[in-house]
Amino acid sequence: MSGFQAPRGMRDLLPEEAAAFDALQAVIEARALRYGYPRIVTPVVEDRGVFVKGVGEASDIVGHEMYDVSLHGQGGLALRPEGTAAVTRAFLEHGLHRAPRPVRFFYSDPMFRGQRPQLLRYRQFWQWGLECFGPEEPAADVEIIDFTARLFGELGLRRYRLEINTVGDAKCRPKIAETLAAYFASNRDALSEESRKRLETNPLRILDSKDPKDRAVVAAAPPLHELLCAEDREHFDQVIASLDRLGHEYKVNQTLVRGLDYYTRTVMECILTDAEFTKSGDIAVAAGGRYNDLVEKLGGPQVQGVGIAGGVDVLHAALKQEGVPMGYATTPDVYVLSAEKGDGADRLQIADPLRQAGFNVAIDYSDRTLDKQLESAVKHGAKVAVIRGTPEARGGNVIVRDLVAKTQRVTRLAAVVTEVGRHVPKHATPPLFEGPQNPDEHEPGAAGEAPFLKDDRD
């Protein structure tokens, strides 16, 4: 065994878990496309300033969780700790702030934070997210909540609760910060050391403290909704009304503020409620909100935005806890064996048409006895063995053995694909391109209507 291990807080995804992650991403990405959010991929390494300016220098991420990177002795880079600031940088760099709005993106990528490893909290973790730039209307906030709730319903996640709140826009944030700072300053001795630091940098973050020492002080703090401007209250009221109309269950939590400084107005979290996870405090399976000033902070024009992100590691663990099957078979359907020595090319010739037809095929290249090769095929999970090199499997014949039913049949090599198909199903090959094959074709109209007609002026 090697003396090396994965770095602390990071882990390997072995084939079954990797297959489950792939399946989750496929479902999430398919739903994102149905909502009009195409995928974007940003670099794993970004300019450190993207997160210092975007997320906030006083945030936990920038303060003590970012992985700094140097190249040939030159620093100023960091491993991407979250997706929103990185996507916003790409939005500006490629001039997409001048594109027709709204501009929507989906991402699903690894992120890195030097946080203390604990239950479902890794230093390398996978995150999916939606970002929508442009709309100021509350309906955009509702859409990402609707997406998330319906996604979890589609996946089978039941044990979570949705919490929402509003933290106000830039116009009334000074009043909120001033009122809370005065209140918490008068209770400074009762606060935890971390909250005392936040009192100097961002008093609003104290509301989100999980430290038991802070909870009593927070509970008696001035209600956040009483400090809001009329426009912020109206915006939030419309979010609430829309969620009610769509039938989504939620809880308004006036101490929910989120840990990133770019949030304005609506914020939300989906928190796991299974006892397996609540013993470690609140664990969010998805969270997000509105960030009306982020584009401007990163050097762009005043463009409003809203987004949400979810942890794939957390989602996978939660679905597994609820007994939801995920992923796909990582074992071969078919094993190709031979009683002859040194005939690797012949075994490949047998495997090739099976693979082309859509079967997952592995080959035993060894010169071990046929019994040992069959034993290995069973251990690898194969359902069918195709055998050559025996007295009956010569001259264009092979044996197709069902390793589950323990039956076999001598078959002409030309018919091996058909015979194997009687025992295991084929797998569809993912298409390289999905889109209209002929852009000039016109689809028929709705039921009872004529097909779309070309304009004579075309």
Image: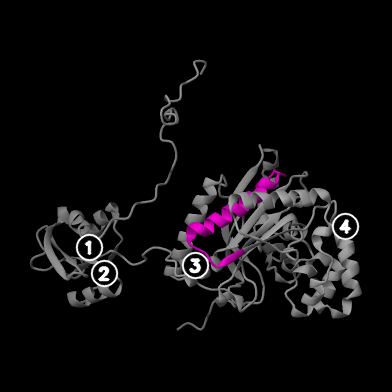
Query: Is residue 136 covered in magenta?
Result: yes
- Contact (Cβ within 8 Å) of mark 2 with mark 1: yes
Please tell me how crowded label 3 is: few (under 14), some (14-19), or many (20+) other residues with Cα within 10 Å: some
Please tell me how crowded label 1 is: few (under 14), some (14-19), or many (20+) other residues with Cα within 10 Å: many
Query: Which mark identifies residue 347?
Result: 1
- Residue 120's place in the image compared with 36, above or below, is below
First in residue order: circle 2 vs circle 3:
3
**Residue type (three-letter) at the residue carrying disc 4:** Pro
Query: Which mark identifies residue 174?
Result: 4
**In the rendered structure, which segment of residues is drawn in magenta?**
132-161
- Contact (Cβ within 8 Å) of mark 2 with mark 3: no
Out of 365 and 24, give the one closest to the viewer. 24
Residue 319 percent across, percent down from the top left = 49, 67
Question: What distance separates the C-alpha of mark 3 from that of mark 4?
Answer: 41 Å
First in residue order: circle 4 vs circle 1:
4
Mark 1 lies on a secondary structure that is: helix
Question: What distance separates the C-alpha of mark 1 from that of mark 3?
Answer: 41 Å
Residue 175 percent across, percent down from the top left = 88, 58
Mark 2 lies on a secondary structure that is: loop
Q: Nearer the viewer, mark 2 or mark 4?
A: 4
Out of 318 and 2, give the one closest to the viewer. 318
Residue at label 2? 364
**How many numbered tags mark residues here?**
4
